[in-house]
Amino acid sequence: DSGVTQTPKHLITATGQRVTLRCSPRSGDLSVYWYQQSLDQGLQFLIQYYNGEERAKGNILERFSAQQFPDLHSELNLSSLELGDSALYFCASSMSRVGEQYFGPGTRLTVT
Amino acid sequence: DAKTTQPTSMDCAEGRAANLPCNHSTISGNEYVYWYRQIHSQGPQYIIHGLKNNETNEMASLIITEDRKSSTLILPHATLRDTAVYYCIVRVSKNNAGNMLTFGGGTRLMVKP
């Protein structure tokens, strides 16, 4: 158990819909990262927040957005969903400057 | 961040040492070598990292060559539960900014009875 929690575990929705994925980092960790893992793309970095502020962006689509709240939990919002958005979405957190990241169990999103 | 090259797959007998190589010939002086693994669709798990010196923890040992152009992750007594994809990642560690991980294809390690 990494100490990072993600909800829900599974999500099935239809094209065009909007969903919100939630992540609670390890106690004391200020950074939250979101990654997407699809069959054809592998694990890809989406976005990072540190203490409530966006710090880095990867290959995140404009239809996706995220935020980190004052209690440090984070939400990833996915809208206008397409079949290709079906993937595992992982959240990770870190604290130290050297920065090993601890990953949650992931949310499996299926868009039908 | 420097690019890494890993074998696509490896087999190891249960109870034997698993030695997973990684080539990072373009590594810069301030880049660390990190290893993570992912057991079938679970979240990636941090294993170990190092800069220049060899490192050991309860999970594994990391051997980095003197010129830092390659490294080897050693699982001293592999078990069936070590079957996973192992990722070698090279990156600069900044002060909590831009510490994203860039995952390549990794090495699929199969531990066999």
Image: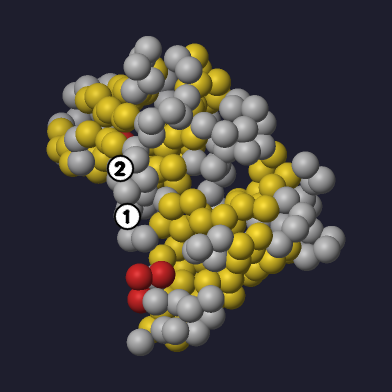
x and y percentages locating residue A15 in the rendered image: 20, 30
Query: Around disc 2, counting alpha carbons within 10 Å, would you say few (fewer than 14), some (14 to 19), or many (20 or more)?
Result: many
Q: Is residue B109 left or right of residue A24?
A: right
Location of residue A16 by image quarter: top left
Which of the two residues, B99 or A85, is positioned nearer the viewer here?
B99
Mark 1–mark 2 CB contact (< 8 Å): yes
Say if B53 sits above or below B14 in the image.
Answer: above
Type of the residue with mark 2: Gly
Say if B57 sits above or below A43 in the image.
Answer: below
Mark 1 and mark 2: span between their CA atoms? Answer: 8 Å
Residue drawn 37% across the image and 12% down it: A70
SS at mark 2? Answer: loop
The residue where tag 1 is placed is B41
Type of the residue with mark 1: Ser
Q: Is residue A37 visible?
A: yes
Residue drawn 66% across the image and 56% down it: B4
Query: Around disc 1, counting alpha carbons within 10 Å, would you say few (fewer than 14), some (14 to 19), or many (20 or more)?
Result: few
Q: Which chain carries label 2?
A: A
Say if A83 sits above or below B13 in the image.
Answer: above
x and y percentages locating residue A41 in the rendered image: 44, 47
The residue where tag 2 is placed is A106
SS at mark 1? Answer: loop
- Image quadrant for the C terminus of chain A? top left
Q: In this view, does A18 lie to the left or right of A84?
A: left
Q: Are marks 1 and 2 on the same chain?
A: no
Residue drawn 63% across the image and 38% down it: A98
Which of the two residues, A55 or A79, is positioned nearer the viewer here?
A55
Say if A35 sits above or below B3 in the image.
Answer: above
From this viewpoint, which residue is outermost toward the right?
B67
